[in-house]
Amino acid sequence: MTIKELERRTGLPRTSIRFYEQEGLLTPERRENNYRDYSEDNVRTLEKIKLLRRLSLDLEAIRRLQAGELSLSRALAGQALALEGDRDDLERYAQVCEELSRTETSYDDLDPEPWLAALEEKSLPLSRRVDPAEQDSIAAAPYPWRRYFARALDLSLAGILWSALQYLVLHWYWPEFGLMGFADTLVSAWGAWLFLLVLEPILLCTWGYTPGKRLLRLKVRREDGSKLDLERAVIRTAWIFLRGFALGVPLLNILCLGTCYDRCIKDQVMPWDQGLRYTVRPAGKKRVAAYVAISLLFPLPSMAIVSESWRLPNPDGPLTPEQVVENYNFLERRVESLWGERPQLSLEPDGRWREAPPVYQDLQEGWMWLELEDSEWGPVEFSTDEDGYVTGFSVTWSPRGSSYGEKLDLWWPTTEFLPNLFLALSPGAEDWSFPWQKTFSDKRVDAVGLALALDQVDFSQTGSRLSSQREDLGGLTGTVEVLDSQGYQSTIETGRLLQEDPGNGVLVLRFTAALSD
């Protein structure tokens, strides 16, 4: 029979069975493929060992019994005398020992079942009790998948804590695409491990478990059965991160996990488990079901945290100019640039640029934004009602012309920078609501659509004017006016002008936004 069947028959965990094998008390046959093949004799041997260990007989005495160097009657008679000191508490156990000794049964003929049943009638005090499943085990835990899933649960919990710290406290946002997206994934893994490196040692030396180990019934103790001290627990977790997960480096960590799996199934002790003892008990269907349920629910807290990170500081109107500026600066931090890196823009409370928008893109250099020492963007000027609440804003842009090519690109700057201004103002017309990320995504599409609509104006004609309204932004109306245009010709491309003398044209634009009444 397999070791799984043997566990079921005897009620002993695999770690205890392997322990008795290492101690030479159990010797299974080997198949041609070198796998163990347990017999009915092995079952009876384990039951005998289980009984004698429950009677507090030490391993050396059992070893001598098996070798025929000690008779069962003599061993149990001596054990009965040893238990006399605690007669009041150990009366039943001593009685079983005496009754067994009077039967004159040999070790080979011992039938443990009725005696085990008798022992269940009264428990041995903790000071004397020997539980084979707890005290007779090896440091290796030959349950690689259970260990993996327990670790995965702990890492997932730590990952939730890291997400909360990253998004809600540090306000640290990474793009979710390309190489930056890969870096974000790696940093998230390291962040989860950072929490685990702090919390797991504390849990192991105080509570004695991590949540994953508690749920899947894994226990790590020192060889004397006591909990790990803090220093030993820290070293153990650090070694797991270094040698078990290869610092989270992709591909290399998979290789390390495979190596750990191979060691587990061969009953080899992990480097970080030297001097420790693992106890593994059957998890049971209820615990497995609980694990599955928790795993299915795990994405919800993370999704809620990410969604909350999109919540505007001021999602409800009406808004003051300072609140609109606060919304805008938040959006500039939260929204990643899709087309290359650009400075993170920000406004002063009075609408002046603390970090003004760059104005051109050099596509030949790979989507790089080009900055000027003196911004071409004027301050954002807010219009307010009699109560001081914002009703709209206006901002001017005076491109000096691009010396990087014959065409002046107005499309990219307007669609990159105007949408966040529209979004910052939009709660004044229509309150934002949960779920925040979906609300942002929907409104972002509308804000970009409004900026694109304004790009349809004829930028080459002084006096040209175009307005567009978006009902999904609470009826927000955007307007672009060409205040002055000299030295430019229109093209068939939306938002692009042909420069008659590159870098020397005159163009003054004014963008306004107004909330509906």
Image (spheres, rainbow, N blue to C red):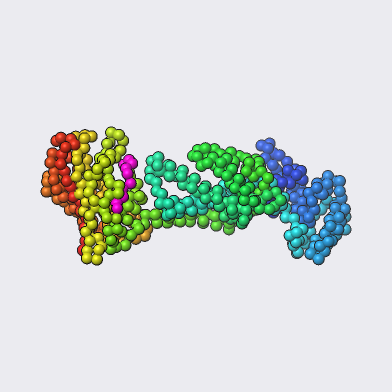
The residue at the point 64 percent across, 51 percent down is 229
How many numbered discs sit on the rendered protein? 0
The residue at the point 66 percent across, 37 percent down is 33
Whether residue 3 is visible: no
Query: Would you say residue 277 sits in the magenta stretch?
Result: no
Whether residue 325 is visible: yes
Give the left or right position of residue 202, taking residue 510 as reference.
right
Residue 262: horizontal and vertical position, in percent? 61, 39
The C terminus is located in which quarter? bottom left
In the depicted structure, whether residue 389 falls above or below residue 216: below
Task: Name the one closer to the observer, 114 or 201.
Answer: 201
Task: Name the one closer to the observer, 361 or 375.
Answer: 375
- The range drawn in magenta is 339-348
The residue at the point 56 percent across, 41 percent down is 242
Residue 362: horizontal and vertical position, in percent? 27, 36
* Quadrant hosting residue 203: bottom right
Give the left or right position of residue 275, taking residue 53 as reference.
left
In the depicted structure, whether residue 203 falls above or below residue 337: below
Give the left or right position of residue 501, taking residue 225 as reference.
left
Task: Name the one closer to the observer, 106 or 275.
Answer: 275
Residue 114: horizontal and vertical position, in percent? 78, 59
Magenta highlight: main SS: loop
Give the left or right position of residue 332, taking residue 240 as reference.
left
